């Protein structure tokens, strides 16, 4: 009998179809059976680097239904696991158009980023505390609510910060005293990261029953991935980087990216077709990864999901960067054109809520924004050659590579958001959902000249940042982020921009919540044209019936994105 190695993960779900991803121990026929329904689906596994996978499209589901399912491999049931104590995994489809998300029923999206599955060996940070994703699962298992969709906004795995267990596995394969040392080196070693992360029993159950959307950030490959042209040139000169980047991109494609796509997009994807139809899909997938690394325009990792009148656009802020200093952009022109098309598709009034998923925040604490703008100008020679070496070292050491460090792209994104917010039939809210910075906050831009033709109300624009799900932050950085929002921090940011001889931005933004620290998830709830959000922090304060510790989520803050000002809350 072929066993189930990893999964199932419930990924794409719409009104009547879904996709279920899984990894098996060998080649087989994978089948999803829906209880009490004729719905279901089957797929033959395909092979990459000695591993076997299936992405099963489930058809025939009823709109607005919740359907239990099970998984068989060659006719033998492998999910639910034997003697499972967890609730039955289900597929919850979107309701019909007349009761679509943001219509008669509220629609909830939980999001966050930066999750250590296990504490890295040698970490000097403070104890990281309970895992927020695990806490969400335990809360749901105990009868609590589940989100309709889970957004994982980067650093799902840490290729450059490995645990004792993973390091022991690496040492069985190669000499970890040589580069890349105790970081992962190739595809096979990346699989160990996903096993460690997704085989956690509660998290495994959660991912089997809540649809998920994912995007990478730097640690999915390596810290500071594509920070600058100098960084990229230095990495490509090593003898280990090529295998690392190919392993990172190919494993991301298999474990994360494919599940982001709809069945129609999968059917038209030439790489997926080549991998599925080959005896071994490794050569085709590696060739694709080589093209994607050499030319960012060769692959699009960004994608769109529509949930009724809610539109989500997940933006690749890592692999598609343009790095030469004179042309520096977060996304290239073709990608920005694509983003414009997707945002504006359907014209004014097409959506009630527009969500832009970006692993990196658009609006940072003002002092940090000023620092990144200043640093970028100096790296391009604004203050002469004597600043160049220092500025590049500072950029890499301090991770100065958010949207603010790509001024051309920052401006383009801002103008697009302003255009949508000022449409005559503007969405009720435009939210940029981000992670990366190991704390959470909410901020709103103040566009003084934002006027809607015809006298309508502009969209409420908000930056919502939630990170980490399970990680830590040094005490000095906590103080730095608090300072970044202070009045003195704002003045420092403006002073740095003036020193760089860069024109100040025509708008400012204010913090409406935070900064908060700890392991957290933020949940955005949309109901009609109303939108609210809550921030929950993981807590180990409760106990299971047998007396063992059980993680939970405690409410930290709640706010409103459309209608009235955000509610007051604890900024601690």
Image (cartoon, rainbow, N blue to C red):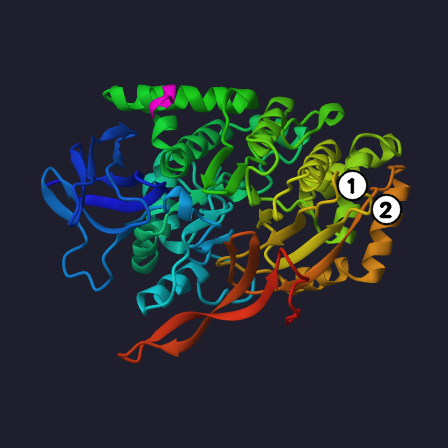
**Residue at image location 35% in from the left, 42% down from the top:** 13
Please state the extent of the stretch shown in magenta in the rendering: 267-271
Question: Eyeballing the image, is 205 above or below 257?
Answer: below
Observer-nearest residue: 236 or 4? Answer: 4
- Label 2 residue SS: helix
In the rendered structure, find residue 373 and report the number of the disc placed on it.
1
Can the viewer see residue 32?
A: yes
* C-alpha separation, residue under disc 1 versus residue under disc 2: 8 Å
Can the viewer see residue 174?
A: no
Question: Eyeballing the image, is 272 above or below 550?
Answer: above
Check whether the beta carbons of the residues at disc 1 and disc 2 lie within 8 A of each other.
yes
Mark 2 highlights which residue? 496
In the rendered structure, find residue 226 and report the number of the disc placed on it.
none
Q: Where residue 225 sits in the image (x, y, percent)?
A: 58, 37
Packing grade of label 2 (10 A; few <14, some 14-19, many >=20) is: some
- Secondary structure of the magenta portion, mostly? helix
Check if residue 381 falls in the magenta segment. Answer: no
Question: Eyeballing the image, is 151 above or below 411?
Answer: below
**Residue at image location 48% in from the left, 59% down from the top:** 470
Furthest-front residue in view? 454
**Sequence-wise first label, 1 or 2:** 1
Location of the C terminus by quadrant is bottom right
Q: Is residue 64 left or right of residue 409?
A: left
Observer-nearest residue: 459 or 514? Answer: 459
Check if residue 270 falls in the magenta segment. Answer: yes
Question: Eyeballing the image, is 372 above or below 474?
Answer: above
Observer-nearest residue: 516 or 24? Answer: 516
Q: Where residue 560 sits in the image (x, y, percent)?
A: 61, 60
Observer-nearest residue: 404 or 16? Answer: 16
Q: Is residue 531 left or right of residue 29?
A: right
**Occupied quadrant, residue 174:** top left
């Amino acid at each position: 009998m072929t066993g189930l190695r990893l999964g199932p993960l419930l990924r794409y779900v719409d009104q009547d179809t879904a996709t279920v991803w899984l990894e098996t121990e060998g080649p087989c026929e994978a089948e999803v059976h829906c209880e009490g329904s004729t719905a279901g689906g089957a797929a033959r596994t395909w092979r990459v680097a000695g591993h076997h996978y299936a992405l099963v499209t489930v058809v025939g589901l009823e709109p607005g239904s919740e359907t239990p399912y099970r998984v068989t491999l060659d006719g033998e049931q492998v999910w639910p696991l034997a003697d499972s104590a967890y609730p039955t995994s289900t597929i919850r489809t979107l309701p019909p158009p007349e009761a679509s998300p943001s219509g008669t029923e509220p629609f909830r999206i939980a999001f966050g980023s930066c999750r250590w599955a296990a504490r890295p060996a040698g970490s000097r940070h403070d104890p990281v505390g309970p895992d927020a994703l695990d806490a969400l699962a335990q809360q749901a298992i105990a009868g609590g609510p589940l989100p309709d969709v889970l957004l994982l906004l980067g650093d799902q795995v840490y290729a450059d910060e490995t645990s004792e267990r993973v390091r022991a596995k690496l040492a069985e394969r190669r000499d970890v005293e040589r580069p890349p040392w105790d970081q992962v080196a190739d595809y096979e070693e990346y699989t160990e990261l996903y096993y460690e992360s997704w085989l956690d029993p509660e998290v495994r159950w959660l991912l089997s029953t809540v649809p998920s959307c994912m995007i990478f950030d730097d640690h999915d490959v390596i810290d500071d991935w594509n920070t600058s042209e100098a960084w990229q040139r230095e990495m490509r000169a090593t003898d280990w980087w090529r295998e690392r980047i190919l392993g990172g991109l190919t494993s991301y494609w298999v474990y994360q990216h494919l599940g982001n796509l709809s069945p129609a997009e999968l059917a038209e994807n030439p790489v997926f077709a080549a991998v599925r139809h080959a005896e071994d899909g490794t050569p085709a997938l590696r060739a694709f990864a080589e093209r994607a690394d050499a030319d960012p325009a060769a692959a699009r990792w960004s994608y769109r999901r529509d949930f009724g009148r809610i539109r989500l656009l997940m933006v690749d802020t890592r692999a598609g960067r343009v790095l030469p200093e004179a042309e520096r952009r977060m996304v290239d022109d073709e990608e920005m054109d694509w983003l414009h098309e997707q945002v504006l598709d359907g014209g004014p009034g097409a959506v009630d809520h527009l969500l832009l998923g970006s692993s990196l925040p658009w609006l940072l604490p003002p002092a940090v924004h000023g620092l990144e703008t200043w640093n970028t100008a100096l790296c391009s020679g604004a203050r002469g050659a004597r600043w160049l070496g220092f500025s590049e070292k500072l950029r890499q050491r301090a991770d100065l590579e958010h949207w603010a460090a790509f001024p051309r792209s920052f401006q383009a994104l801002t103008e697009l958001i302003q255009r949508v917010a000022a449409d005559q039939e503007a969405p009720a809210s435009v939210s940029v959902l981000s992670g990366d910075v190991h704390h959470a906050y909410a901020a709103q831009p103040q566009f003084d000249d934002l006027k809607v033709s015809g006298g309508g109300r502009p969209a409420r624009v908000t930056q919502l940042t939630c990170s980490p799900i399970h990680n830590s932050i040094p005490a000095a950085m906590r103080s730095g982020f608090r300072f970044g929002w202070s009045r003195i921090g704002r003045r420092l940011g403006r002073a740095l921009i003036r020193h760089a001889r860069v024109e100040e931005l025509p708008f400012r933004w204010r913090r409406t919540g935070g900064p908060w620290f700890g392991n957290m998830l933020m949940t955005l709830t949309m109901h009609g044209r109303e939108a609210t959000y809550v921030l929950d922090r993981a807590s180990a304060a409760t106990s299971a019936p047998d007396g063992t510790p059980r993680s939970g989520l405690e409410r930290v803050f709640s706010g409103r994105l459309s209608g009235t000002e955000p509610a007051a809350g604890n900024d601690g």
